[in-house]
Image (tube, helix red, strand yellow):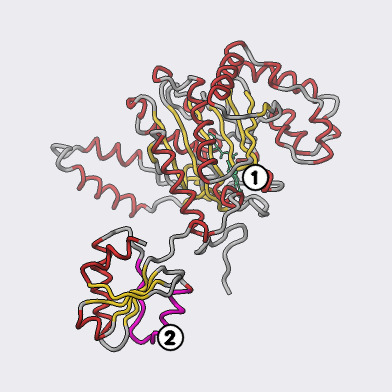
């Protein structure tokens, strides 16, 4: 038997109702905060993540699904050029050999390293640059979709998992640097978690400063690590020289007492970063969003500057971060774009669903009516009626039975589906143009003329 690959899983009904509930709620909240959807490809050039997320991060160093895409054959390049000429024949004017040879040269015939996206921020910033979206001022994006990391699978950790991502990005002149945006994003998350019914979350908040602060901090970290690093794990020994900040990602229990003694970024923030952080906290207090400061929180991606945060939830065990995010004021420049400060977060949707404490039945919409055709030729009548009812009220949920079922089979089927009503469509009913409507919970049965059916079913 062929099974789903390790670390991936099928999301099946009825559980998918929980996923729909979460995504519908998220879309409602994003609409209320004036965010718009963006969809970027599931795979990108490997270089995007190496430069964006950082070579030394666990994500890039160990967890990416990367492959070498084969280059195009000579025949494929020629075919592409033909298509290009065909598509451009009206705009290109007279036959332009130079344009065609330029196109030939710019076409890659060699292969390219590609990677399944391990996260969405780098792809969204790439799209921002590629489509020159600074012209629109401040952009408020959201995206929902699968991400891929080759991590060791366990509860709440998968190799294909889903994120609900939001990003605010734009030129500084559009206010993208303002602490008001950080607070808005955090307050949005609190609203979303409240609306899906997750109560006991904790917002862990830190500022990881700007590149200047980071340089001083890294220097101090290197010094502090020197005498102790030989007692730490191999990863930390490497990080101590390449990117000392990443030592804080270490999960090895024996290293933790050493990490506890290391200097913290909070002591290295310059005045601008300190003021920015104070303002974020001030707005959060004003709007009543609780947080705890955690100056060990550095996040597992290199692009963060200033505000960094995670929302944790006790029910999740070891993988307790429902979501994480922060500011990435230098990411656009690192990817070759203009200055475009930004802040965002990504919810681990798998973890959010795990923390809901709801069952699929709590959020599912059962059928309003089960139409039971009784006897030969009644499937047609039932289908006509179903079409009329759906047309009368597009909110009705209607399930259709089959004329080969007897009433003895139709009623239990409707009960199993938790339908509110059973509508009986037999020869006599069709002749009279009035149908038996049975309310399953009370057992009450009435005959309702065709024209009044929809109204009667909607009434409850
Ligand atoms: P991240 O902390 O790497 O941040 O991931 C965000 C969330 O995705 C985590 O808190 C967790 O809930 C979920 N997650 C990560 N890995 C897995 C996994 N293997 N299985 C299940 N869930 C997982 C980012 O990805 C950033 N792009 C967030 C961001 C957006 N920062 C700014 N904007």
Where residue 152 sits: x, y (%)?
Answer: 68, 52
Between 126 and 50, the one lying in front of the other is 126
Where residue 236 sits: x, y (%)?
Answer: 76, 35
Q: Secondary structure at mark 1?
A: helix
Query: Residue at the location (24% across, 35% down)?
Result: 98
Query: Residue at the location (54% across, 48% down)?
Result: 349
Q: Secondary structure at mark 2?
A: helix
Between 41 and 385, the one lying in front of the other is 385
| Mark 2 CB near ligand 1 (8 Å cut) | no
Q: How many numbered marks appear?
A: 2
The quadrant of the rendered image in which ligand 1 is seen is top right
Q: Which mark is residue 444?
A: none
Q: Using a 10 Å C-alpha cutoff, classify the residue at mark 2 as few (fewer than 14 neighbours), some (14 to 19) or many (20 or more).
A: few
Query: Residue at the location (39% across, 30% down)?
Result: 139
Please tell me which of labels 1 and 2 falls first in the chain.
1
Q: Judge depth for marks 1 and 2 and give the one in front.
A: 2
Q: Quadrant of the C terminus?
A: bottom left
Q: Which quadrant of the structure image shows residue 193?
A: top right
| Span of residues in magenta | 398-415
Q: Which quadrant of the structure image shows residue 422?
A: bottom left
Q: Does 159 sit left or right of 96 as displayed?
A: right
Residue that mark 2 sits on: 408
Q: Is residue 113 above or below residue 54?
A: below
Q: Quadrant of the N terminus?
A: bottom right
Where residue 351 sits: x, y (%)?
Answer: 60, 49
Measure the alpha-carbon separation of dots 1 and 2: 59 Å
Between 98 and 397, the one lying in front of the other is 397
In the image as oriented, which residue stretches furthest toward the bottom? 376
Q: Which mark is residue 62?
A: 1
Is residue 184 inside the magenta stretch? no
Is residue 411 inside the magenta stretch? yes
């Amino acid at each position: 038997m062929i099974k789903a690959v390790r670390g991936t899983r099928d999301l099946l009904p009825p559980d998918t109702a929980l996923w729909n509930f979460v995504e519908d709620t998220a879309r409602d909240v994003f609409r209320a905060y004036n965010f718009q959807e963006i969809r970027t490809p599931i795979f990108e050039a490997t270089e995007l993540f190496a430069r964006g997320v950082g070579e030394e991060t666990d994500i890039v160093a160990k967890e990416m699904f990367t492959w070498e895409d084969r280059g195009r054959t000579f025949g494929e390049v020629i075919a592409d050029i033909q298509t290009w000429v065909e598509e451009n024949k009206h705009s290109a004017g007279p036959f332009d050999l130079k344009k065609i040879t330029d196109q030939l040269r710019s076409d890659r015939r060699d292969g390219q390293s590609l990677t399944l996206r391990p996260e969405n921020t780098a792809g969204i910033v790439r799209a921002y640059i590629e489509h020159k979206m600074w012209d629109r001022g401040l952009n408020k994006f959201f995206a929902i979709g699968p991400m891929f990391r080759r991590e060791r699978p366990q509860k709440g950790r998968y190799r294909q998992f889903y994120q609900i991502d939001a990003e605010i990005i734009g030129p500084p002149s559009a206010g993208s640097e303002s602490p008001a945006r950080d607070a808005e994003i955090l307050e949005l998350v609190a609203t979303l978690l409240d609306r899906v019914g997750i109560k006991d979350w904790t917002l862990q908040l830190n500022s990881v400063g700007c590149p200047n602060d980071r340089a001083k901090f890294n220097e101090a970290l290197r010094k502090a690590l020197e005498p102790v690093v030989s007692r730490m794990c191999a990863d930390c020994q490497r990080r101590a020289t390449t990117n000392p900040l990443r030592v804080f990602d270490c999960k090895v229990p024996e290293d933790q007492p050493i990490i506890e003694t290391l200097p913290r970024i909070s002591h290295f923030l310059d005045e601008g970063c300190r003021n920015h952080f104070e303002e974020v906290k001030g707005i959060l207090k004003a709007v009543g969003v609780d947080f705890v400061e955690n100056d060990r929180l550095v996040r597992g991606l290199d692009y963060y500057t200033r505000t960094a945060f995670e929302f944790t939830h006790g029910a999740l065990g070891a993988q307790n971060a429902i979501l994480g995010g922060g500011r990435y004021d230098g990411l656009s420049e690192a990817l070759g774009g203009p200055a475009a400060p930004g802040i965002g977060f990504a919810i681990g949707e798998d973890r959010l669903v795990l923390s809901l404490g709801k069952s699929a039945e709590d959020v599912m919409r059962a059928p309003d009516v089960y139409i039971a055709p009784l006897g030969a030729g009644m499937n047609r009548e039932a289908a006509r009626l179903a079409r009329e009812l759906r047309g009368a009220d597009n909110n009705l949920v209607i399930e259709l039975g089959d004329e080969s079922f007897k009433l003895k089979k139709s009623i239990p089927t409707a009960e199993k589906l938790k339908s509110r009503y059973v509508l009986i469509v037999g020869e006599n009913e069709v002749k009279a143009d009035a149908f038996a409507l049975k309310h399953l919970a009370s057992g009450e049965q009435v005959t309702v003329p065709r024209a009044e059916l929809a109204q009667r079913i909607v009434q409850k």
